[in-house]
Structure formats: structure tokens, C-alpha cells
Image (cartoon, rainbow, N blue to C red):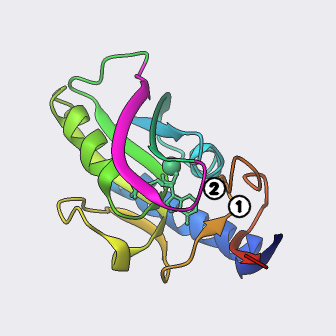
Amino acid sequence: MTERVKVLIPQEEVEKRADEIAARINRDYEGKSLHLICILKGSVFFTAELAKRLTIPVTMDFMSCSSYGSGTVSKGIVKLVKDLDEPIEGRDVLVIEDIVDSGNTLSYLLGLLADRKPASLALCTLLDKPARRVKKDVVVDYCGFEIEDHFVVGCGMDYDQRYRNLPYVGIMELEGE
Ligand code: IMP
Ligand code: MG
């Protein structure tokens, strides 16, 4: 089977969008400190892109959960693999994701985080695939790009743990199945 990656969103567009979203976040949280929560591993790259553009005081923490197997189809079961290091009670929290697909992961994670009583809780994602949403309660506050129902890689997103380091978003094409 041959794997091919076709560019969907070039690096320059991703970076330009990161500029725009960071500017909005800087405005929205003016006078406050923001606690960024990076969802490992996929959102590492986008979190870094955003964080280095933020001028408000920022702290960061990381959590990890699994909802996908090794292929391209969600199992719908979310498991917490690594919890945060620090409490979030009373803090302004922004969760950063690579992509919201069914919404299963974020529905579970946002519920878990809301129970810890942050001062505010918002969600930022590089990509949103609204056509695939199962969990309608997931509200995206900052969205990079809405995309069609493609399986994508790059900018942190993987296919069997590969391609995360591509600096653009590409469509994963599998030929000869
Ligand atoms: P959800 O729980 O179905 O919303 O899926 C969320 C997670 O699945 C994302 O954080 C990604 O890690 C992964 N995922 C969903 N769609 C894609 C894709 O097109 N490419 C790579 N990973 C994806
Ligand atoms: Mg992810």
C-alpha cells in the first residue's frame, strides 16, 4: 500500500492563521494570565505556534488521552493517559487541540476539566471537522480552519505516529488497498 500526502493547508496559511488567533486571544484575555493546556501528542506543534505569539502572561500544562487506535477510525472510547501536573481551580484555562472530529475526546476532557472549577474554560483547535461531530455539546471558541471529512496529517497530526512533523496540513491518501 502506498501512502501519499497531498497539501491541504500550506505552512504559510497555518502561520498566518496562528497570527490571527493569537491576536484575538491577546485581546480577549487582556489583563489576565492564561493557562494553556496542550493535549498530547497532536497539539504540541499548534500549542507552540500559538504560545510564542501570545504577549499576555502564559503558563502551560499537558495532558494526554487516547481515542484512536492505530488506524484512521475513532473507537469512541476515551481514556485519560496522563493527567495535568497542576490544579486549574480559579485559573483562566485554554485547551488547545489539533483537530476536533467526533468531539468524543473534547466532550470527555472538557467535562473533566470543568469539574475542577477553573475561572474560565475555552477551547482552541487548529482544525474542525464539523460534519463528523457526534458530541454536539463541544463548543469551539477559536478555530483555525474548518475542513471537509478528510483524514489529515502534519502540524502535529499523525498516521500511525508518523507525519506529525510536516509543517503543513496534508490529506493522507492510501492507494492500493
Ligand atoms: P475525536 O475524539 O473524534 O474528536 O478525535 C479527536 C482526536 O482524534 C484528535 O485530537 C486527533 O488526535 C485524532 N484525529 C481526528 N481526526 C484526525 C485526522 O484526520 N488525522 C489525524 N488525527 C485525527
Ligand atoms: Mg489530538
- Labels 2 and 1 touching (C-beta < 8 A): yes
Placement of 114 over or under 164, stated as above or below: above
Marks 2 and 1 sit apart, C-alpha to C-alpha, by 5 Å
Image x and y of residue 174, in percent: 73, 74
Q: Residue at x 66, y 52 (%)?
A: 156
The residue tagged 1 is 154
Q: Amino acid at mark 2?
A: Met
Q: Residue at x 43, y 67 (%)?
A: 143
Quadrant of the snapshot with the N terminus: bottom right
The residue tagged 2 is 157
Is residue 30 something that shows in the picture?
no
Image x and y of residue 33, in percent: 38, 34
Please identify the quarter of the rendering in which residue 19 is found.
bottom right
User: In front here: 127 or 87?
Assistant: 127
Q: Residue at x 19, y 66 (%)?
A: 136
Magenta span: 70-84
Instruction: Identify the residue at the far front of this view.
Output: 177
Mark 1 residue element? loop
Say left or right for 2 vs 64. right
Q: Amino acid at mark 1?
A: Gly
> Dot 2, crowdedness within 10 Å: few (<14), some or many (≥20)?
many
Q: Is mark 2 within 8 Å of ligand 1?
A: yes
> Dot 1, crowdedness within 10 Å: few (<14), some or many (≥20)?
many
Please identify the quarter of the rendering in which residue 102 is found.
bottom left
User: In front here: 157 or 113?
Assistant: 157
Quadrant of the snapshot with the C terminus: bottom right
Image x and y of residue 69, in percent: 53, 47
User: In front here: 59 or 37?
Assistant: 37
Please identify the quarter of the rendering in which residue 25 is found.
bottom left
Is residue 146 something that shows in the picture?
yes
